[in-house]
Image: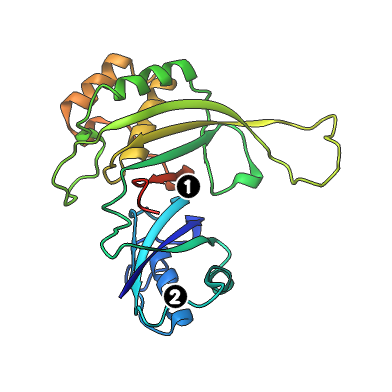
Amino acid sequence: MARYFIHLAYNGASYNGWQTQPDLPTVQLTLEQALGTLLRQPIAVVGCGRTDTGVHASDFYAHFDCAADAGLPDNIVFKLNNILPADIAIYDIFPVAGNAHARFDATARTYQYHVSDRRLPFRQGQYCRIYYKPDLEKMNEAARVLMEYDDFTSFAKLHTQVKTNICHLTEARWDFVPVSNHVAVADAPMADNAVTDYEWVFTIRSNRFLRNMVRSVTGTLLDVGRGKLTIDGLREIIEKKDRCAAGTSMPACGLFLTRVEYPQTQH
């Protein structure tokens, strides 16, 4: 058997997450069916993570095995993209060592969460609308506090089968960024009355994440940004190691997996 990595991206709005579930549309199942049709053999795909229902991935990796003597057809990326629905894009497929693993070999992952207090018609399903203006400086102060800890039990979904709630964060920050809310037209000048919209974007990088962790962390930091929670209160939440103490988990639509990192020798 030969092993291959797939580099892909997907809009998760129409899927019940990555992982295959009975009688529900998932990215994993859709990809396995397309590969099986193209390669004319059953294909099992292993992803680098398990994004939840409605969560997006602009950078995602998976691996699969197929008979070594069969090989892959020419232009497989082009052919696979023609079979898959438009909300899944294959960037590359390449051979790796037989023991390479898309999930276990990843050394770091980065997520981003997008919120705005504006109505963004061209960003529907890709951000969460809020109805207040959070304090960017306070949220970044709170994000720096996160970096002081490694036990994130307070932000983990209850009753999941994980051996540890320890995560080593290497980045946590908020940015205030402009958003293009208009359809681009080549060589067309910007209208005098054009509106520049904006988002607050939370970026977090770690060696691993707990289930629902990013969405619950984001909700808690937004509580700091809107004045509902103090920095000392955030510390108390983290140190309690109690999920019930943390803020509300944010909706899936604003969450993106934006980067998955591997050792340089991986590919």
Vertical position of residue 181 compared to residue 38: above or below: above
Residue 130 lies left or right of residue 264; in this view the side is right
Horizontal and vertical percent position of residue 208: 28, 42
Question: Which corner quadrant of the image does residue 2 belong to?
Answer: bottom left
The residue sitting at 26% across, 33% down in the picture is 168
Of badges 1 and 2, the one in the foreground is 2
The residue sitting at 86% across, 37% down in the picture is 189
Where does label 2 land, which residue? 35
Colour scheme shown: rainbow
Mark 1 surroundings within 10 Å by alpha-carbon count, few (fewer than 14), some (14 through 19), many (20 or more) = many
- Which element is circle 1 on? helix
Determine the CA span between mark 1 and mark 2. 27 Å
Vertical position of residue 119 compared to residue 233: above or below: below
Horizontal and vertical percent position of residue 103: 30, 54
Vertical position of residue 158 compared to residue 221: above or below: below
Where does label 1 land, which residue? 253
The residue sitting at 34% across, 54% down in the picture is 48
Res. 17 visible in picture: no
Mark 2 surroundings within 10 Å by alpha-carbon count, few (fewer than 14), some (14 through 19), many (20 or more) = many
The residue sitting at 51% across, 26% down in the picture is 175
Which is more toward the observer, 179 or 127?
179
Residue type of the residue flagged with mark 2:
Leu
Residue type of the residue flagged with mark 1:
Cys
Residue 88 lies left or right of residue 49; in this view the side is right
Which is more toward the observer, 71 or 154?
71
Which is more toward the observer, 76 or 37?
76
Question: Do the numbered discs 1 and 2 sit on residues whose CB atoms are within 8 Å?
Answer: no
Looking at the rendered image, the quarter that the N terminus falls into is bottom left
The mark nearer the N terminus, 1 or 2, is 2
- Which element is circle 2 on? helix
Question: Which corner quadrant of the image does residue 165 belong to?
Answer: top left
